[in-house]
Image (cartoon, rainbow, N blue to C red):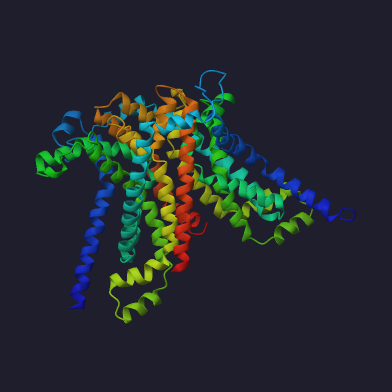
Amino acid sequence: MVGKNKTIGNIFVYAFLFIAALFTLSPLVLALINSFKTNRELLVNVMSLPDELHFENYQRTFEKMNYLRSFLNTAFLAVLSVALIVLFSALAGWRLCRTKTKLSRFLLKLFIFSMLIPFSSIMIPLYKVTLQLKIKNSLVGLAFVYAGLGVSMAIFLYNGFVKNIPKEIEEAASIDGCSPLQTFFLVVFPMLKPITATICISNALWIWNDFLLPLIVISDNKKYTLLLSTNTLFGQYSSDWTAILSALILAALPVIIFYAFFQKKILKGIVDGSLKG
Amino acid sequence: MYGTTAMQQKKIKNLQLIIFCAPALIVYIIFKLYPAGSGFFYALTNWNGLNKTYDIVGFSNFVEILSDRYFWNSILFTMKYVIVFVLVANVVALTLAVAIESRPKARGFFRTIFYMPNMISMVIGGYMWMFIFTKALYYLADNHGFKWLDHSWIGDPNYSFIAIIIVSTWGTAGYLMIIYIAALQGVPDNVKEAAVVDGASPWQCFWRITFPLIRHALTICIFWTLNAGFQVFDVIYTLTGGGPGRATQSVAIHIYEEAFRGNIRYGYATAKSTVLFVIVLIVTAIQLKITSRKEQEW
């Protein structure tokens, strides 16, 4: 009796998981199969597989959304922003942890308290700052904005990580005549590698998928990120679903590939950043 | 070290600290603290975003907000959205986590799938769902008899609210699930086994043993969903754009529209941003107080 109950329970749980998985994947799968159809075929049957693969949909949107340029813009933005966040936060987080003064406690609080401020509360004054500094429509400028918004969390994580690595190695290095900056780059930074990887991945994903900030700061379509191009394309081709769906697949492709390669690290990063932080 | 007093050493340490913090501090002040601070200031002005000059008008923006029906509607909509979203997303995520954890062999496979939507921007996810809501569901209703799917999912505010909740949950449940799974794995097996030996049903076992032990994960996830919920933008922007009319405008959408579309009144819009900030602060403080007390009780 117990055995039978268990099998029924098993079937029930698996059925639930499979239905949930189907539901989760349905937008991606439907977008993928319909992106290869002609518009006429799509209107006749949304659920069927395409009769033949119309790659010209992709060819068309690849050009229409300036895919290569948008991709490179996004990649440049993400890489530069992450580099700035890592460098700035590692320097600050390490020193904040190693200095035990009133000033260090104050600075740490100053960096962390603003994590509660919602972005929509600062977006208008932030927009004005980008106008005043003449960095509107500048990807480099936008990377510095992301650094300003991202350092809080990264400093918090670095600070926590440094606590658990022994001081003695750094002290030995400084006795051997290393300047603080040399000590940082030659001795400390290599030891921070695990948390640096976590910070890189989570920030890269955040910036890659962020929409609202580029939407208000970038208006020059030569500087568009992937999401801005996708959004514009959606506005221009509002009923041409094969064009839109192929654009969506193209826009989702980089992160899906990234996910395939770094899945373990990404999932571990979430746990490290939330439960242990 | 001879000749340097403790005071001087401390000064040197602090100076070093400032030098190392300087790069982070500069970008942080320019792009986060200054905007946050100056937002409070602009809220007291009639600046329209274009003119170089503006007057300080005191609290008149805030007085005007009191009678701004559209703003309060967007606050109400956001509140409603936050409550439903926090509940639905956490229940779904916890259910998925428990189901996955009970079947260790299939864990990796399902975890990979359920987390996938979190990788994709909600802008892309939102447009993909738009296709489902405006094309696929009609097709299913017309050709396969799923008549209950035949609604104006985007055009009718009641159904578009459901659509927005579905898409937000789809996009975040996987993230929460990962946190819940990690917490569930931290529950020691022998405690659960002892309860089973004592004759507890799986249901009792979960609520009496497991659930109290994963409360910290619950706190984190509720905190996270509250924060994300109050800032909801991408999903609504792509699905309904706040419409029909202003029926599904969240505060973030409302402020964006106020500031960057149509009538540009930055002073007035920053006053609204300030109100939003205060609301978020109060809600977060209350939530942290409640959950931290509960955690101690258990």
Q: The N terminus of chain B lies in which quarter of the figure?
A: bottom right
Q: Quadrant location of residue B81? A: top left
Q: The C terminus of chain B lies in which quarter of the figure?
A: bottom left
Q: Is residue B142 left or right of residue A28?
A: left
Identify the residue shown where x is 31% and y is 28%: A234
Q: Where is residue A38 in the image (x, y as percent from the top left)?
A: 20, 30
Task: Using the rendered image of the protein, determine whether residue A128 is visible from the camera's viewpoint.
Answer: yes
Q: Position of residue B39 (x, y in %)?
A: 54, 33
Asked if B226 appears above or below B51 in the picture, the reply is: below
Front-most of residues B98 and B161: B161
Q: Where is residue B25 in the image (x, y as percent from the top left)?
A: 64, 41
Q: Is residue B105 left or right of residue A209?
A: left
Q: Quadrant location of residue A65? A: top left
Which residue, as the protein is rendered here, is positioned at the far right?
B3
Asked if B90 appears above or below B69 in the picture, the reply is: below
Identify the residue shown where x is 21% and y is 76%: A3
Front-most of residues A147 and A189: A147
Q: Is residue A54 left or right of residue B27?
A: left
Front-most of residues A128 and A64: A128
Asked if B247 appears above or below B230 in the picture, the reply is: above
